[in-house]
Amino acid sequence: MSVLVYTENWDGRFKKLSNELVSYGSKLAEMLNTSTTVLSIGKVDEAELKSLGKYGADKIITVTDEKLATLDNRAYTAVIAQVVEKEKSGIVLLSNNNTGKAIAPRLSVKLKAGIASGITAVPEKTSPFTAAKKVFSGKAFAKFVIKTDIKILTLAQNSYEIVEKTGQAAIESFSPSVSNDLIRTKVINVEKQTGKVLLTDAEIVVSGGRGMKSPDNWGKIEELADLLGGATACSRPVSDEGWRPHEEHTGQTGKIIAPNLYIAFGISGAIQHLAGVSSSKFIVAVNTDKDAPIFEAADYGIVGDALQVLPKFVDAVKELKSL
């Protein structure tokens, strides 16, 4: 009854959320007195695969079938289900990102398995298996009891600390049986954004709201993001006004992000906005209104005019980087 962790790769590389997943899976395996198996689909070199052993993977199963070079939810679900059967896995763990949200429900139906999505902590107990997640935009917690033999969990990003271990993982190749009828996705062309950190991938995000007063004032937001190696974002009113592109809109109706650091200038923190950024590890807020809702979610807050604080913020970062 192993714990099976499915982690995707990006151009043959694993990201921080992969290490988070494996660390969480390893802790689950420890609680259940079993092993941690990681499934990787796609071409990843051996050194990169072995790196997951540092976070608790006991075995890594790699699938490199060319038919699976492009993510197809139906085909990937079939592959994961075959590995679950092969490994006799009792728990399947995925990330609560777009891929996990697409695959987990399909897998739940196929395996007749109970599912808890967006969990944020290890189970309080394993008999009965009780998982917890944040609800109401992070204002409360809900507990789920899963009674099925196989359980599917999707882990919210930045909800579990990465733990390094000394173990090494064995690597095993697997050739699944995948019908061509399952593969409906065909990629005709790929255009990648260059020279800019993608918002959903960024570890640091610098965001602005209507408190920036004009699109002409966004230069310092971009400068700070560049200095920190991060991405830029905005609140919905800003994108609705056309100050910034809609692809930068974060919130319940925009992009859901979970960077290590989210810095918000001139954003009041409406519940819809906080729903999209509340999983950030640290939130820093700058607003003139000391009673702004964003201060309730922020780890650090500055009461002041964003247009006055931001230039000083930029100067301070420049000074630190020059040391």
Image: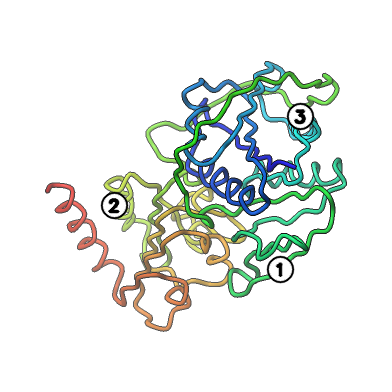
Callout 2 crowding tier (Cα within 10 Å): few <14, some 14–19, many ≥20: many
Circle 3 sits on which residue?
Answer: 79
User: Residue placed at 78% from the left, 47% from the top?
Assistant: 105
Q: Do the residues labelled 3 and 1 touch (CB within 8 Å)?
A: no
In the image, 274 versus 139, the foreground residue is 139
Question: What's the residue type where badge 3 is placed?
Answer: Val
Gap in angstroms between the C-alphas marked 3 and 2: 43 Å
Question: Which of disc 2 and disc 3 is earlier in sequence?
Answer: 3
Residue 42, located in which quarter of the rendered image?
top right
Q: Looking at the image, is 69 positioned above or below residue 245?
A: above
Gap in angstroms between the C-alphas marked 2 and 1: 39 Å
User: Residue placed at 52% from the left, 60% from the top?
Assistant: 279
User: Residue placed at 39% from the left, 51% from the top?
Assistant: 204
The secondary element bearing badge 2 is classed as helix
The x, y position of residue 146, in whole percent, is 79, 59
Question: What's the residue type where badge 1 is placed?
Answer: Lys
Give the label, 3 or 2, closer to the camera: 3
In the image, 187 versus 97, the foreground residue is 97
Give the label, 2 or 1, closer to the camera: 1
Q: In this view, does 293 lie to the left or right of 106?
A: left
Q: Which colour scheme is used?
A: rainbow
Circle 2 sits on which residue?
Answer: 224
Q: Looking at the image, is 99 positioned above or below residue 314?
A: above
The x, y position of residue 198, in whole percent, is 46, 41
Question: What's the residue type where badge 2 is placed?
Answer: Leu
The x, y position of residue 182, in whole percent, is 83, 26
Q: Residue furthest bottom?
A: 291
Circle 1 sits on which residue?
Answer: 143
Question: Which of disc 1 and disc 2 is earlier in sequence?
Answer: 1
User: Residue placed at 57% from the left, 71% from the top?
Assistant: 271
